[in-house]
Amino acid sequence: MKRTAIAITTLLAAALCTGASVAADELGGLEFDTVDADADGFITFLEIRAVAPRASREQFDDFDVDSDERLDREEYSSWLDAFVGRD
């Protein structure tokens, strides 16, 4: 798991540093069901930090539309688009 998180972090860092846009199928591990470690249908800030250590709480909260401290699929999709620079 740690190696996967490091690989994902490296991919994201490279994309963010170069300003590249990353397609969902290139993210290998950032799919909703993969990040949702406890499979409860929501993603918490801790689950995001496990795969994207550079993610900030402030950014997470910006996409938590209903302020329930977790992201549903739609909120997560919006967060992911912003985090990896997809249009």
Image: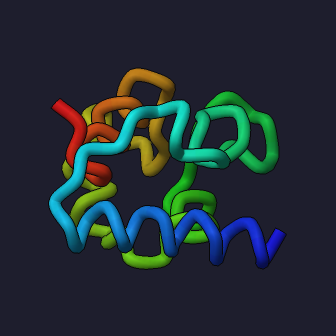
Give the image location of residue 62, x and y in percent: 20, 50
Give the image location of residue 24, x and y in percent: 47, 33
Left or right side of 62 for 10: right
Q: Is 77 located above or below residue 46 in the figure?
A: above
Give the image location of residue 72, x and y in percent: 49, 29
Choose between 42 and 34: the one closer to the eye.
Answer: 34
Choose between 43 and 32: the one closer to the eye.
Answer: 32
Choose between 16 and 83: the one closer to the eye.
Answer: 16
Tell me the quarter of the image containing the N terminus: bottom right
Q: Is 9 located above or below residue 67 in the figure?
A: below
Task: Examine the image and state in which quarter residue 78 appears.
Answer: top left
Left or right side of 4 for 66: left
- At x 79%, y 36%, the residue is 39
- At x 54%, y 32%, the residue is 25
Choose between 3 and 38: the one closer to the eye.
Answer: 3
Q: Is residue 29 visible?
A: yes
Give the image location of residue 61, x and y in percent: 28, 55
- At x 72%, y 42%, the residue is 34
Tell me the quarter of the image containing the C terminus: top left
Q: Is residue 64 visible?
A: no
Which residue ends up furthest to the top in the rendered image?
Answer: 74
Task: Examine the image and state in which quarter residue 77 appears.
Answer: top left
